[in-house]
Image (cartoon, rainbow, N blue to C red):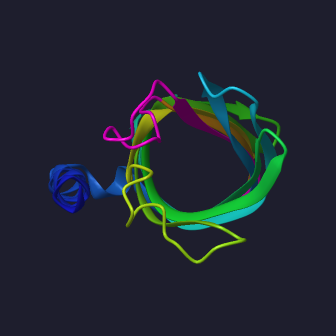
Amino acid sequence: MKKLVISVGLMIGIGFTQVNAQNLSFGSKADANMSNFILTDIPGGKSEMKIGASLGGFVKYDIAEKFAIQPELLVHFKSSDSKDGSVKNNFEYWGLEIPVYAVGQWNAGSGRLYAGIGPYVGLGLSAKYTKGDIDLYDTETMQRLDFGGGAMIGYELGNGIQINAGYKIGLINAVHKDIPGDAVMLPQTMSLGVGFRF
């Protein structure tokens, strides 16, 4: 997985060395998120959203006046309550995400409205129930790799400050493939945040 993340980063970096620097801009962003898992084939299982946060940066390449490509690198903390029958646990995990959005953008008032859609790849760093110290990635209960799709919408003021909202859903089962049974856990996240484009 580390090789995949490094390869994606290198391809993005090499690609941007071939573009017109005048069309490049950089930025930072931070958001509050709410996340949980969509569960199937887990009798009595339930996953409730709780609050987390993410922090990172982005590179934006304007291909045309109304179209851009925007890869991001985010470090996130996510939290949810999980319930299996009568047992309830708080679940917390840290990870990295690299979404790449195709962005449409339109002038609106003194700023710019934008919306994007695209895939993301994620790498889990730590996943634990707060009632225990066992890392669920180390025990191969959960998979570190995450892949899915996301969408975002936002508004950028004339000074570069952004307000944005987003949604991501994973397409890879978070339950490790070697765990017996048909249980499926797909992560989903909603976010609301701010950013600044230099």
Instruction: Give 49 or 85, whichever is nearer the viewer.
Output: 85
Instruction: Give 128 or 157, whichever is nearer the viewer.
Output: 128
| Residue 17 appears in view | yes
The span picked out in magenta is 171-195
Q: Quadrant of the C terminus?
A: bottom right
Q: Quadrant of the N terminus?
A: bottom left
Instruction: Give 195 or 169, whichever is nearer the viewer.
Output: 169
Tell me residue 93's x, y (percent).
59, 63
* Residue 5 sits in quarter: bottom left
Depicted 135 relative to depicted 61: above or below: below
| 7 relative to 34 in the view: left or right | left
The residue shown at (56%, 34%) is: 185
Depicted 63 relative to depicted 144: above or below: above
Whether residue 57 appears in magenta in the rendering, the answer is: no
* Residue 89 sits in quarter: bottom right
Q: How many marks?
A: 0
Tell me residue 17's x, y (percent).
17, 58
Depicted 64 relative to depicted 137: above or below: above
The residue shown at (16%, 55%) is: 7
The residue shown at (18%, 49%) is: 15
Instruction: Give 94 or 101, whichever is nearer the viewer.
Output: 94
- Tell which residue pokes out farthest to the bottom in this image: 133
Tell me residue 18's x, y (percent).
15, 51
Tell me residue 37's x, y (percent).
65, 38
